Image (cartoon, grey):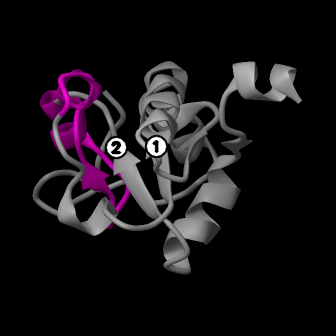
Amino acid sequence: MFSLFRRGPARLTPQQAHQRTGDGEAVLLDVREAPEWKAGHAPGASHLPLSRLMAGAPLPAAAQGGPVVAICRSGRRSQEAAKLLAARGVEATDVAGGMTAWARAGLPVTDQGGGGGVIA
């Protein structure tokens, strides 16, 4: 049991994350920095950079009170974010492979203006 705790929250595939957040079961929280977010993110995702999360910033309103799925570019920052959120008492997990895997899976990516985004 303790070995499971040390590993942190379970990770989701991009497809699992898309389904859970698309169904309203959880909120997708992008923890990349602002320039990365502006270049391309999952439609409907909330944004809070890991640097601000680490500084104690509150979750965006849409991500409060329910499960959160964290995502970043490759999965490293989102895994750290999920651990931080779990320590705050939030039901949190993250996306293995991040936005890179999300885009590779053919899932939607949008830019700040609502057009086709890129993963920066």
Question: In the displayed structure, does residue 33 sit left or right of residue 89?
Answer: left
> Residue shown at 60%/37% (left/top)?
101
**Three-letter amino acid code at the position of disc 1:** Ala
Q: Quadrant of residue 71?
A: top left
> Residue shown at 47%/47% (left/top)?
89
Q: Dot 1: what SS? A: strand
In this rendered view, identify the residue nearer to me: 111 or 22.
Answer: 22
- Quarter holding the C terminus is top left
Query: Which residue matches tag 1?
Result: 70
Question: In the displayed structure, does residue 84 sit left or right of residue 33?
Answer: right
**Residue at the farthest bottom position:** 23
For marks 1 and 2 on the same chain, the one whose residue lies earlier in the sequence: 2
Q: Do the residues bearing badges 1 and 2 touch, measured as CB atoms within 8 Å?
A: yes
Q: Which residues are magenta?
A: 34-56
- Image vertical order of residue 85 relative to residue 33, above or below: below
- Image vertical order of residue 32 relative to residue 114, above or below: above
- Quarter holding the N terminus is top right
Question: In the displayed structure, does residue 86 sit left or right of residue 120?
Answer: right
> Residue shown at 67%/28% (left/top)?
8
**Does 53 lie within the magenta span?**
yes
**Does 104 lie within the magenta span?**
no
Residue 50 is marked as none
Query: Which residue matches tag 2?
Result: 30
**Residue at the farthest right position:** 1
Q: Position of residue 48 (x, y in %)?
A: 22, 41
Q: Dot 2: what SS? A: strand
Question: Alpha-carbon distance for marks 1 and 2?
Answer: 6 Å
**Three-letter amino acid code at the position of disc 2:** Asp
Q: Position of residue 6 (x, y in %)?
A: 72, 19
Mark 1 Cα within 10 Å, few/some/many (few <14, many 20+)? many
In this rendered view, identify the residue nearer to me: 93 or 106.
Answer: 93
